[in-house]
Image: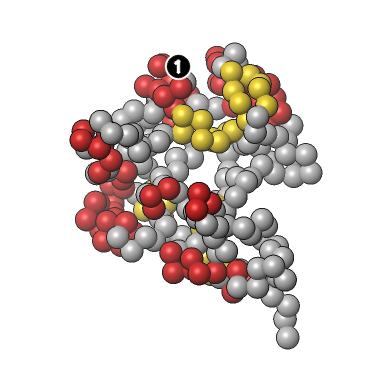
């Protein structure tokens, strides 16, 4: 019998041009059933689509102060380390850095949001007077860098990921696989205890090895 080493990850992900798929089909086939999809032309209107590169941030905004995993560094230092990153010695992974904390000129480079992220019910003025639940964030990582925990986003909100440079690998599991994810409790209920998706500890997480999900770049 073949040894099971991890969950089954399917790499067949639908790809569409927004101009071809249209909103009705997009909502019907992907948003409502919670299926992943790649939209290939969603952010072509962004100035960031042509401007935002590692070299651009290093040369034009290298002095931006950052905090990554408790470490204080500048954008210039981060980019230098990202360029030298390896699987054995990965660079710090900048994540969840709010776009609204960047210089205004950079904020304008990612406006307006693509059509595929609307309507956003959290933009209702009555909700926003209580709390802003919409987060637009910057992620910068190098070879070997990983998001530190398998999770779902708070309040079960949709996540829209806009790739500007390089290659990033994503692993996701549909809601039907939640009983196999070893979720925590309380404040950690949206986080999995599984610490290695590709080679999970079969003794600690035997159910996870039977999960089915998606992997794509």
Q: Going by the image, does 138 lie left or right of 195?
A: left
Is residue 174 shown above or below 216? Answer: below
Find numbered disc 1 in the image and state the secondary structure of the residue it sits on.
Answer: loop
* Image coordinates for residue 47, horizontal then vertical, percent: 40, 25
| Residue depicted at x 46% and y 29% | 98
Circle 1 is placed at which residue position?
103
Is residue 66 shown above or below 136? Answer: above
Res 21 → quadrant: bottom left
Res 87 → quadrant: top right
* Image coordinates for residue 204, horizontal then vertical, percent: 69, 67
**Foreground: 190 or 140?**
190
Res 215 → quadrant: bottom right
| Residue depicted at x 44% and y 27% | 99
Q: Going by the image, does 172 lie left or right of 154?
A: right
Q: Going by the image, does 44 lie left or right of 67?
A: left
Q: Is residue 49 visible?
A: yes
Is residue 93 shown above or below 152? Answer: above
């Amino acid at each position: 019998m073949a040894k099971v080493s991890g969950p089954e990850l399917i790499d067949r992900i639908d790809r569409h041009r927004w101009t071809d798929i249209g909103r009705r089909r997009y909502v019907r086939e992907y948003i409502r059933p919670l299926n992943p999809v790649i939209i290939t032309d969603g952010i072509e209107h962004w100035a960031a689509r042509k401007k935002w590169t590692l070299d651009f941030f290093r040369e034009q905004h290298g002095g931006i102060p950052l905090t990554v995993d408790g470490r204080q560094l500048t954008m210039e230092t981060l980019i230098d380390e990202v360029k030298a990153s390896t699987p054995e010695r990965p660079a710090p992974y900048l994540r969840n850095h709010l776009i609204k904390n960047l210089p205004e000129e950079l904020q304008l480079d990612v406006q307006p949001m693509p059509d595929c992220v609307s309507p956003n019910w959290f933009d209702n003025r009555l909700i926003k007077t209580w709390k802003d639940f919409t987060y637009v964030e910057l992620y910068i990582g190098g070879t070997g860098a990983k998001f530190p925990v398998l999770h779902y986003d708070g309040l079960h909100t949709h996540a829209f990921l806009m790739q500007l440079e390089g290659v990033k690998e994503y692993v996701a599991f549909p809601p039907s696989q939640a009983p196999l994810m070893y979720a925590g409790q309380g404040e950690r209920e949206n986080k999995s205890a599984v610490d290695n998706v590709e080679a999970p500890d079969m003794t600690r997480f035997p159910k996870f090895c039977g999960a089915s999900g998606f992997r794509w770049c």
